[in-house]
Image: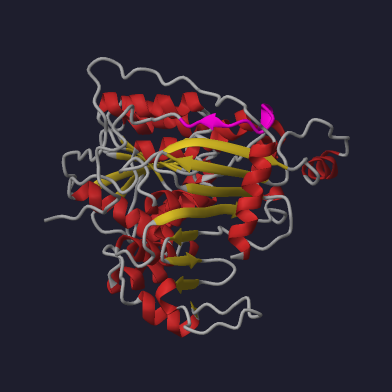
Amino acid sequence: MKKILTILAFAAVLFACCPKQAVIKTKVPPRPAGQEDMLQFAAEPIADVGIGVVGLGDRGSGAVHRLTYVPGCHVAAICDIEPDRAEKNLKVLEERGQTAKIYAGDDQIYKQLCEDPDVDLVYICTDWIHHVPVALYAMEHGKHVAVEVPSAETLQACWDLVNTSERTRQHCIILENCCYDFFELTALAMAQAGVFGEIIHAEGSYNHNLDPFWDGYRNNWRLDFNQEHRGDLYPTHGLGPVAQALNIHRGDRFETLVSMDTNPFNGPKLVESRTGKPCTDFQNGDVTMTMIRTAKGKTILIEHDVMTPRPYDRMYQLVGTDGYAGKYPVEEVCLRAEMPEEVNYQDLDFEKVYTGEELEALMAKYPNPIMTPELKALAQEVGGHGGMDFIMDYRLVYCLNNGLPMDEDVYDLAEWCCLTELSRISLENGCAPVEVPDFTRGAWNKIDGFSYAFAK
């Protein structure tokens, strides 16, 4: 209850900042002639998916390792501008009894990989600014694409990916691993079973102290991005899983958002400590908050904070008419049906809260359909953020093998990533409300609820 009151107070402050302001609208371009939406699009099955991995830093190298354990695929090619990274990953493949072509040496070398006839899927793990150029070139050359987060940073990039995917009829998915974490998968299954009643509010975040990582990025490109851009630069870890629970563009849609941020207190210090020069132009606030309202009158709170020392937290909360699920700081579920008949009103924590073994027993009654015991065990063995990366890869390849619609389509990519620019627009206009564009161009209510596809 205290958390809900905090949210309501935050919402009141946000909207007090922009009294009677008109909603800012962004352009929704008409769908080009001859194009159709990609909702529930299924490509021809690929029995053995040839994967080309572009970008072999930490994320790309992790993907190469994991993909050697995924059935129904092989790493056909690897690509990086730095040859030593490519050679290092080739050794990883060879240790697993596999091999791949190497493309390395300059910042345009990815084009050769995208043109390779042995590549069916381009798996993009470059730095952020190269995500979209590689994805567009790959689709133009007949490849499906899977793009690491954040897949796009601007509205124009989101529209370019949507239009190119629709025109070429190639999958363009976002590699949002948090949709495959064990708690989120089970909470989603519980929500779909009606355990929480109707989901009316959700929360997600990326609160992660990156102090140990700033120097780990070559040329500090991520710090540069925060210095040069204002807004929620990394929204999808928090937004993706809750958007699925709210059936976004599968019966509901994001309609309006409002953002607020703090001043940049820590960012300038980071730059000054690394350059020895004063920093007076740091753009991104330490904390950015965005509230979204959907067409069906539901709300979402999203936070971004990579500058303060608070503990890692993706929030992940589902608030329903009859129940609640939350992952941080402890995993817990609270159900209306379990409220006591007699209450001591001095006790502010009288609700029946499932945690620990009780929670495990409750959640075991609602297994997610994609999470078989065998897959979970393999995911935990192979790893990748506790196993969720492996489950994400497994589902991607499974859907391609069987010619099924993807769990996350190009509209998910655009809707989740567009918060970066939309939050900036709101912030730069005094926390004004901003309309979220309908990337489906009117088809958001065509599907009744989020679901996974399975081979018959």
Q: Is residue 422 above or below residue 208?
A: above
Residue 72 seen in render:
yes
How many badges with numbers are in the image?
0
293 and 121: which is toward the camera: 293
Point out residue 26 in the picture as x, y percentages from the top left corner: 50, 22
Residue 109 seen by the camera: no
Q: In this picture, which residue range is highlighted in magenta?
A: 427-436
Q: Split into 4 quadrants, where in the image is the C terminus?
A: bottom left
User: Image quarter for residue 114?
Assistant: top left
Q: Residue at x 63, y 76 (%)?
A: 348
26 above or below 333?
above
Q: Is residue 29 left or right of residue 250?
A: right
Q: Which residue is at 24% across, 37% downward?
A: 446
Looking at the picture, does residue 357 appear above or below residue 287?
A: below
What colouring method underlies this structural image? Answer: secondary structure
Q: Is residue 452 above or below residue 149?
A: below
Q: Position of residue 328 (x, y in %)?
A: 56, 66
Left or right, residue 414 beside residue 105:
left
Which SS does the magenta portion mostly show? loop
